[in-house]
Amino acid sequence: MGPTARIDDLKPDFLPENTLAAFQKALDLGGDGIEFDVQLTGDGGLAVVHSDQLKRIAKAKGVAFQDAEGLCSKFNMSSLSSQDVGNNHTVPSFRGVLDFMVEQNPGTASGRGMTLLLISN
């Protein structure tokens, strides 16, 4: 896959922003970190998506997000994570992105004897 792009500018060989594939590509190109946006879902989950307003995704993909006012906060995480946001990529959860980063950097925190981030229910 090629470079990343905003969802409304997505070409067939591009990776949509805020997806695990885009984060992997950034790391593959030598990036030492990633930046992403997190939105609260209707069921209290955390979705990695640029804006609470899903109009860009709906416009780009013809998705019926307008049925719930087009707001991320009106959908549950399961529903959002099953939506194709472009080129067969989906909305990841915050937890999924954290797990991905730990997998990409095994032992970096534990090797230093520290906890970088702890999430507890």
Image: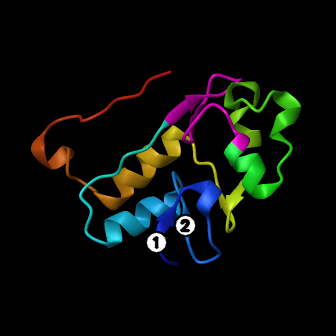
65 with respect to 72 (left or right): right
Residue 39 marker:
none
Task: Write down the region rendered in magenta.
Answer: 38-55
Residue 110 pos. (x, y %): 19, 45
> Label 1 belongs to which residue?
3
Give the structural element (helix, strand or loop) at label 1. loop
Q: Which residue is mark 2?
A: 15
Give the SS element for disc 2.
Answer: strand
Q: Nearer the viewer, residue 83 or 113?
A: 83
Residue at position x 50%, y 40% in the image:
95
Q: Residue 93: image x %, image y %?
A: 57, 42
* Residue 75 included in the magenta stretch of the image: no
Q: Estimate the spatial distance between the alpha carbons at disc 2 and disc 1, rounded to whole Å.
A: 6 Å
Along the viewing direction, whichever of 109 and 33 lies nearer the viewer: 33
> Are discs 2 and 1 less than 8 Å apart at CB?
yes
Neighbour class for label 1 at 10 Å: few (<14), some, many (≥20)? some
Residue type at mark 1: give it: Pro
The type of residue carrying mark 2 is Leu
Residue drawn where x is 83% and y is 29% of the image: 68
Q: Is residue 82 left or right of residue 9?
A: right
